[in-house]
C-alpha cells in the first residue's frame, strides 16, 4: 500500500467503509510491499470492520504463483463462505487488531 498510498488511499478507505467483504492474503517474505510497511494503514482502515490478513509463510510478492495451492484453498473457503470451525478459527487467528495509538481513518475520507 505505501507504494500507491497517494494514488489509492481513498479507494482503500471506500472499500473499508463499503459492503464488499475483504480478505488480505499476504506473503510474509514480500520484499516489494512488506506488511511492516503497509501494516499501519491496513490496520487503521480495515481492523474496525473485522477484516483478516492471512500471512503465508515463506511467500513473497508473487504468492499467487509461489504458493498457488494455499492461496486457492484460502480463496475457495472465502468465496464459498465456509462455516467449518477450522476455517473460522483460521480467519480469527489472522483478524486485524487495531493500532492501539492510532485514530481510525474510516470517517476522514
Image (cartoon, rainbow, N blue to C red):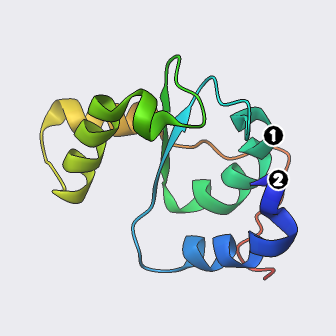
Secondary element at image label 2: helix
Q: Quadrant of residue 68?
A: top left
For disc 1, the marked residue is 37
- The count of marks equals 2
Q: Nearer the viewer, residue 43 or 61?
A: 61
With 75 as the anchor, is 35 left or right in this view? Answer: right
Mark 2: few/some/many CA within 10 Å (<14, 14-19, 20+): some
Q: Earlier in the sequence, mark 2 or mark 1?
A: 2
Residue 79 position, x and y percent, is 23, 58
* x, y percent for residue 57: 50, 19
User: Which numbered circle lies on residue 57?
Assistant: none
Instruction: Specify the quadrant that holds the N terminus.
Output: bottom right
Residue 34 % position (x, y): 73, 34
Element type at mark 1: helix
* Residue drawn at (36%, 39%) of the image: 91
Per the model, the C-alpha gap separating discs 2 and 1 is: 7 Å
Image quarter of residue 74: top left
The reply, left or right, for residue 26 in relation to residue 11 is left
In the displayed orientation, state which residue is furthest to the top.
Answer: 58
Q: Height in image: 73 above or below 14?
A: above
Q: Is residue 87 above or below residue 23?
A: above
Q: For the residues labelled 2 and 1, say whether their Cβ atoms are less than 8 Å apart.
A: yes
- Name the residue located 51 percent from the left edge and 80 percent from the top edge: 18
Q: Which mark is residue 2?
A: 2
Q: Would residue 45 be found to the left or right of residue 28 on screen? A: right
Give the residue at x 60% y 59%.
Answer: 46
Percent across and percent down for residue 63 are 48, 35
The quarter of the image holding the C terminus is bottom right
Amino acid at each position: 500500500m505505501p507504494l500507491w498510498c497517494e494514488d489509492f488511499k481513498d479507494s482503500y478507505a471506500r472499500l473499508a467503509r463499503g459492503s464488499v467483504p475483504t480478505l488480505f492474503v499476504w506473503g510474509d517474505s514480500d520484499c516489494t510491499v512488506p506488511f511492516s510497511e503497509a501494516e499501519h494503514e491496513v490496520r487503521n482502515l480495515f481492523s474496525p470492520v473485522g477484516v483478516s490478513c492471512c500471512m503465508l509463510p515463506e511467500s513473497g510478492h508473487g504468492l499467487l504463483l509461489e504458493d498457488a495451492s494455499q492461496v486457492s484453498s484460502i480463496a475457495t473457503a472465502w468465496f464459498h463462505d465456509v462455516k467449518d470451525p477450522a476455517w473460522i478459527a483460521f480467519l480469527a487467528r489472522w483478524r486485524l487488531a487495531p493500532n492501539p495509538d492510532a485514530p481510525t481513518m474510516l470517517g476522514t475520507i
